[in-house]
Structures are given as structure tokens and as C-alpha cells.
Amino acid sequence: MAASAWCRAAPPDRGLGEAMQDARSSTMSPSLEDSKPRPRWLAAVLAVCASDAVIVAALFLLARPYTGISLDARLYIGRGLADLDPGGVGRDVMFLNDGQSGFSLYTIVLRHLVGWLGASTAAIALSLAGVAAWFAAAAVLAGRLARGRAKWAILVALAVLPAFYGYTEVLRAAEANAVPRPFAEAGVLLGLAALASGRRVLACAAIGLACLFHPIMGLAGVAVLGLFLVVADRRWLLAALLGAVGVAIAAALGLPLFGRLFTGIDPEWRAVLDAKSPILFPSLWPGEAWGRIALQTATLLIAATLVEGRARLLLVCGLLVGLGGLALTLLAGDRWASLLAVQAQPWRMLWLTVVLATAALAVCALALYRRGPGFQVVLALLTLGWMFLDAPVIASSAAGLAVLAYAMAWRGLIDPSRIVAITAWVVVGVLVAFKIGLQAWAITAILQATVVGSNRGLGMVRTCAVLLPLVALGWAFRARVGPRSLAAAALGVALSLVALGAFDDRTGFQKTVERGTALPDLAARVATRPGEVLWIGGGPEAWLLLGRPNWITAMQGASVVFSRSLAMIWSERIRRLLALDLATPDDYTAFVSTVTDPLPRLTAASMGRLCAAPDAPTWIVAPLEVPLEPALVDRATLYRLPQTDATFVIAESGFSWRRIDTYALLACRSQSVIE
């Protein structure tokens, strides 16, 4: 059957919620075609505003607020600044030992955009462009594989459901961040859409472009393309075998990049990677990651039996690619510690698995519910697992039970009564309602504790306590008023304006930092002496505000897998700060900190020991959560912040807001040593 048979139960050419209001009278709400004639341009605008595409796109954007130059965007923006200022930010130890930027076209694009627009504007523009590209590519793929309600159900699922992969909630597909991953993912999705249409040349071009932006993320597309080719013509297996032999020969000859295949990671380097980047080694992943993988596998297996043709092949390939990459990492990276296997991170192909599994859940929801009570129980189990992805026992148990129940229902071994299905849904509904209630309580408590200078907390929109009621209300509203009514157009306009207006969730102080305008007097003072800056508890502030290299930060440890020299320098300096109580354990051991301790307090003793070292920083910037000790007051210059720097802090005792109103600047290494 053609790939358009994604869901046999989906009637053609019917929009989201359209079937729910067929029997309703058009008089329930004024139609775009009712009453007196309107100008054609106005009718066209209203039709677009009321369309499923606009509403789902707005929902997609609303679920991805922009949090600024954070996470990996700090590294990419920093690389752009370093390229533009090789004598300043370019002297940062991270960029002097850069082992990854040369493999991506994105760094070239970013360098020009940062030089043209500035770091702040370039970052938000790239983030918005990445989200738009990803959604457009997903819409094209959904349009190739589904029609009507199935298509829009897939896009709604991709908009609202969590798309995290790998180690806990660190990496997610379709992220709103100034990184190359969303663009590479979009290229792969476009390539899959081309494959679903039988257009191999276009698929190769799209996936090739994805690899130019991010080779690691594009690898999933290459693998799926290869599987499609092998299924179509087994002779491609010979080409794959010859390619593998060629790689082995290149590795044996020690050719650049390929030689890393047979190069091991020494114990000292491995210890740093285990501590700072457990994301690289699946054997170190927590149960949450494996529960998520189990549920995604179950969802894809079930959905693959509900579709035919290229759609089925695509789902199966997506599953094989993700699990194959994970197995390769466990064997070649975790066990053999091959440098190339660890750096290539084939486990990241799981991003495509989670995207296709999310789409597959929409397929299951439409098909299983119509097949009777036994299959409705299966759908209830899948729903339970997806709603509790962060609970590995529930997620993995739901996955196993769903597959078992589906197999038995498929073979006719079970045929429960309708009351059994209703009971299953009641139990699932109660558990989901309980989780939503807990999240709503936490959101309310956080909002009530908001302080001056904090952001709007739009990251909480991602929770099911907000998204699910929003989707349910929107669906019911459109079913009530009709998809072509003025009210539906108003809903589309309102949701779009809210999504665009709420996209930027940075604090006021964060915006001034990213623009480089927060503390001009401090920057002028630092400019009087060259050298590195130690920004206690900081990230990219030294790059953005001062145009200076960081002496060391926890942030720089994110790239230690690509450079042994960086790993050794980073580890030694962070350990030195830990010994002086100028860093927290999370700075060394957490890939992304989830527990934030109080900021380290600078003391005269710790400063004296640090600044006596021959490689000491020139300056120390200390955010003052508590006043400086008296011995340092005369040596420091205090700078009052134009706006309060408020940071949401999650600690073992609960949550709170850290408020910083003053920075202290202290000279560390003497001028004679610098000269």
C-alpha cells in the first residue's frame, strides 16, 4: 500500500476536530462564508488564521520558550565570538583546545551572524529559525505519511509530548536553542519525507545537508537511508560491506579521524569523562532513560503493525537505527573505549527514534480506540507510560504490558468486556489527574514565590499540567464553533500572538548581559589589564560582557570528550577551585546541574592561594549573594547591577530564588607576572 496509508482509519482530507462537529449546525458560530461578502484578501487571511496549521504551529512554539544563550548555545555563541576576537575570547582554553567546531557548517554561519547582528540577536534569531525549520519539516513528513486527522494528531503529539533522549532530560529534539541540532534534525526529517515519497535523490540531498550542520545528528538519517536502499536492492549490502572494509583500512593506516577508531581512551581521561559526561556512556544512564527507551520501543512495535508500505518500513528503520546506535555505543564506546565511537556518539540516533515514537503514539491513539475494548486497554497502558516517562518502573511496566496485551488481543486470546476497558481508562485517568494536580500545585507555588527580576517561568508551559488542558480546551472549542468560523480564526490569531509574545523568556538582566551592555564600568576596568577572568559560578558572562577568556567554568567541561588536553586542564583547575571552596561538586560531576548549591564565597585565604599560582587569573568577578568578608572589602570594586539577577534554584531542601544585586571585581595575578 502507498505510504499515505499511515492510518487506515483516518478519512482523507479532514482537518483536526472536523469530524467531531459534522452534525452541528453552521449557525452555532458565524462561518467565514456566512453573512455579507468580504474582500477576498480578508477571507483568505481569516481562512489561514483559522487553519489547523496556524493553530498547531502556535502550540508548537508555545511549548518551546526561549531561555537565552544557555546550555550548548553558550559554546556555539562563544565559538563565534572567539572567531571574531582571536586575541580576546579566542584565547579561552576551551577554544585553544577545540576539537569539534571544524566539522560543522553551522560555526561559519554563526560567526557571520554574530558579527552582523550581535550575539543576543543572532542567538534568538537562530533559535526561532531552528524551531520553524523543524516544524516545517515535521509537517512535510506528516503530510507524506498521513492525511486529515492523523496528520494533525501527529503534529499535536510532536508539539506537546516530551522528546528527550539519552541521559535523563538533557537533550531533546526540536529544542529552541541556538545550536545546529534542530537544523540537522529538520534536514533528516525532510529526507525521510522524500524517502516516503520514493524520491531518493532529494532524500540524499536533505540528509547530506543535515550532516553538514551536525554530522552526529545527521548519522540517523544516513542509517535510515541505507536501510531503505538495502530493502529496495540487496546489492547495497555489498556497498556497505566495502565501505566498512574501507573504514577499517583507513583506521589501520592511522588516517585523520579514522585513526581514532583503534585509539583507546586512557584511564585518566576516562575518569574525567565518567564524572562530567556520563551521557556518553549508556552503562552510566539512570533507570529513567531505559524506561523511556522501553516505552518508545513498545509504541513503535505496535504502530508498525497498524500501518503498511513505506510508513511501516520507516517506523521499523527508526527503531532499528536508535537501538543499533545504542548497542554500538555500549560495545565500542562503553566496553572497548574506542575514541571514535565515544566521540561519534552513535547513541544520539535515539533522537529519531523518539520523534517517530511520538508520531507513532498518535497513530495508535486513532487506530486502537476503534478496534474494540481489548485494544482500548492497550491504548490506556501506552497513555499511562507516556504520561509517566519520568518514572522508569511505571514506563517500562506499561510498555511490557502494552505489548503483551496487544499481542494477545491481536491473536484473539483476550476479548475483555467494555466495562474492563472503561475501568482501565478510569484508573489511568485518576493517575494522570493526580500527576497534573501535583504539577499544578508546584507551578502555583513557584509563581507565588516569584521575585522582582525573575523570568515569567514559561518553561513550566512544557508540563502536562498546562499543555494537556490547553489542547483539550482548544480541540473542544473548535469542535463547538466549527473549523471555518470567525471564532476559530480568532483562536488562531490569539494563540499565535501569545506564542510569539511569550517566546522570549529571558530575565531583564539576562538580556542586558547577552547584549553586552549590563556593566560597562566593570568591562572598562577589566580592559586595563590583559588576561583570563575567573567568574565565580559563571558561564559565558566573561565572553559576552568583557570579551575575555574564562580562567575556568563548569560550562567548559561540556567539550572535554573532544580534546584530552582540555579535559586535563579543565579537571585540574576545577579540582583546584573545589579544594579552595570556590566551586561546588556539581561543577565537576554534573553534565547539567539539577541541584544548585549556594554560590561559593570568596575569602581572603582562598584568594591568596589561588592568586599565588603562576597560571592564576588576572581578575576575579564574584557575584555577592552575601557581603564580602572585611579583609577583602578594601581590595574590591563593587558594581551595582542595573537590574536584579534572579535565578531559580532547585536544592535538596526545595526551591527558591537566588537574588544578586552586586558584583565584586578583584585583581588577582599581579601586573608584573602578567608582563
Image (spheres, rainbow, N blue to C red):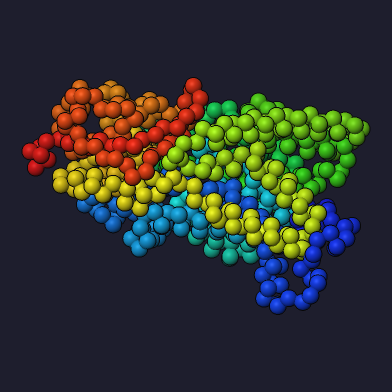
Query: With 508 as the anchor, is 532 left or right in this view?
Result: left
Q: Residue 216 in the image: state x and y as whole percent.
A: 48, 48
* Along the viewing direction, whichever of 212 and 334 lies nearer the viewer: 212
Query: Which quadrant would the C terminus be assigned to in this image?
Result: top left
Residue drawn at x 62%, y 31% is: 441
- Classify 605 as above or below 54: above
Residue in the image at 85% along x and 30% along y: 423
Q: Quadrant of residue 323?
A: top right
State the residue at coordinates (27%, 31%).
573
Q: Is residue 489 left or right of residue 373?
A: left
Label tally? 0
Question: From this viewpoint, is residue 75 visible?
Answer: no
Note whether 337 is above or below 94 in the view shown. above
Q: Quadrant of residue 263?
A: top left
**Toward the viewer: 350 or 363?**
363
Q: Nearer the viewer, residue 23 or 189?
A: 23
Q: Is residue 34 above or below residue 472?
A: below
Picture coordinates of residue 136, whole percent (x, y)? 60, 60
Quarter of the figure with the N terminus: bottom right
The answer to whether residue 542 of the structure is visible from this angle is: yes
Q: Position of residue 515 (x, y in %)?
A: 35, 53
